[in-house]
Amino acid sequence: MGPSTDLLAFYQSVRQQTVRLTENLSPEDMVVQSMTEASPGKWHLAHTTWFFEEFILRKHANSFRLFDENFSYLFNSYYEAVGDRHPRPARGLLTRPDLATVLDYRTHVDACMTELIGRDDLPESTRAMLAEMVVTGLHHEMQHQELLLTDILHLLSSNPLNPAVFTGTAASTSRTPTSKWQDCEGGLVAIGADKGAESADFSYDCERPRHRVWLQPFAIANRLVTNGEWLEFIEDGGYENPLLWLADGWDTCQRENWRTPLYWREVEGRWHQFGLDGLQLLNFAAPVCHISYYEADAYARWAGKRLPSEQEWEFSFADQPIEGNFMESASWRPQPADASSTAVQVYGDVWEWTSSPYMAYPGFKPESGALQEYNGKFMANQFVLRGGSCATSRAQMRPSYRNFFFPQHRWQFSGLRLAEDR
């Protein structure tokens, strides 16, 4: 197979996977927006299609015909340089176009993209540039696959019928492995990514450039914090002790009446957790998830530890194989770790909050054109998470990947790993 054949196969696999994730959803499931931060499933299907239309087909496809000239307004997310857009909080009001039309839109764009990727009359420099843009669009779509899952989970959690989207995979173990510590001497170390166009070497601009940082000696836990350990925090009054919390975190905790992680429910005296596979008994050995940065930080203080910085996390685990409970595992919730004396659950299961604010690396240069808005303009008031989750595509993950959310956000599959100074 040549480069264009490989790229087309990658394109088709990602695009088909997005639609497969919605097969168990009704048209009604696909239109409702449960909160400002979440988007309807139908909108995700359309927006990821608009991305290829706007940034690739409009500029590079011969005689390209827009499917609907109104879609640029309806399905632009936050690209100010591209034009006006429908307000984000009102995406759930878009009952039209209907789901069938959005799927037709995807078919139309996919046909045009297939033709463009397969062209053999383009100069090599143009082909390389297009390949880089296509790969960026596919990684963008994989991000939205995860958002689609977390957004529908939040929506269905409000339904008293506790509906399941998928049938999950039973946990292989319910025993919590012994917590051990990995000592790191620190020193001058290199983190970050170098720019690459192939999918295996892909990185976003916010992961670059690779650069050196100084780390003091530290230790990092070999595993994630579990539900059982979090229950000890709850029973010890962790949600009632203001001394454990950052001021804004305590205010948020009181205002939102946080008393457990999101989706925990006590039913007839037993703890349960709602997930994409419905309401299940809480597995005490599984990693705690759906917690905010504020909660993770408070737990770390309660435990006498701290959250690792993103630099400590990447340096500690840069050589770990990228294996774990990803979306492809179809477990649909974090799973318990197998007993191990080495680092476990580095990738998959839950995104791990770090203590690092999301900001530019030294020498950061944003992408050119409208893609300047992809990452750089969000570098304020958010924190970095590392490692991926059970809703993350395996193809998306790499040691340098930086996810980021506001410290009060809980609807993502987010958990924590502890660290301490040495």
Image: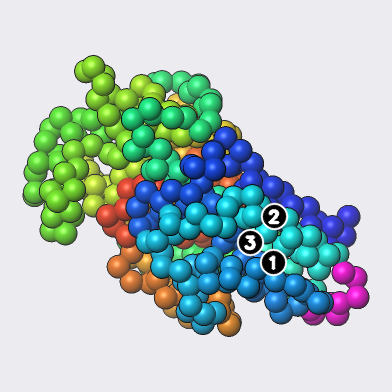
Can residue 18 be seen here? The reply is yes
Provide the secondary structure element on which disc 2 rests. Answer: helix
Asked whether, in this view, residue 56 is left or right of residue 285, the answer is: right
Asked whether, in this view, residue 297 is left or right of residue 219, the answer is: left
Q: Which residue is under mark 2?
A: 104
Q: Earlier in the sequence, mark 3 or mark 1?
A: 3
Q: CA distance from mark 2 to mark 3?
A: 11 Å
* Dot 3 and dot 1 residues touching (CB under 8 Å): no
Q: Tell me the number on the disc at residue 49.
A: 3
* Percent coordinates x, y for residue 375 in the rendering: 47, 70
Crowding around mark 3 (Cα neighbors within 10 Å: few <14, some 14 to 19, many 20+) is many
Q: Which residues are magenta?
A: 119-126
At label 3, the amino acid type is Thr
Residue lying at the far right of the rendered structure: 121
Q: Nearer the viewer, mark 3 or mark 1?
A: 1
Q: Is residue 103 above or below residue 390?
A: below
Q: Is residue 118 above or below residue 41?
A: below
Residue 252 or residue 94, whichever sits in front: 94
Q: Is residue 339 above or below residue 126?
A: above
Q: Tell me the number on the disc at residue 67.
A: 1
Asked whether, in this view, residue 236 is left or right of residue 224, the answer is: left
* Dot 1 and dot 2 residues touching (CB under 8 Å): yes
At label 1, the amino acid type is Phe
Which residue shows up at 50% across the image and 22% down it? Answer: 170
* Percent coordinates x, y for residue 392 in the rendering: 53, 47
Which residue shows up at 34% across the image and 38% down it? Answer: 158
Can residue 389 be seen here? The reply is no
Which residue shows up at 16% across the image and 44% down it? Answer: 257
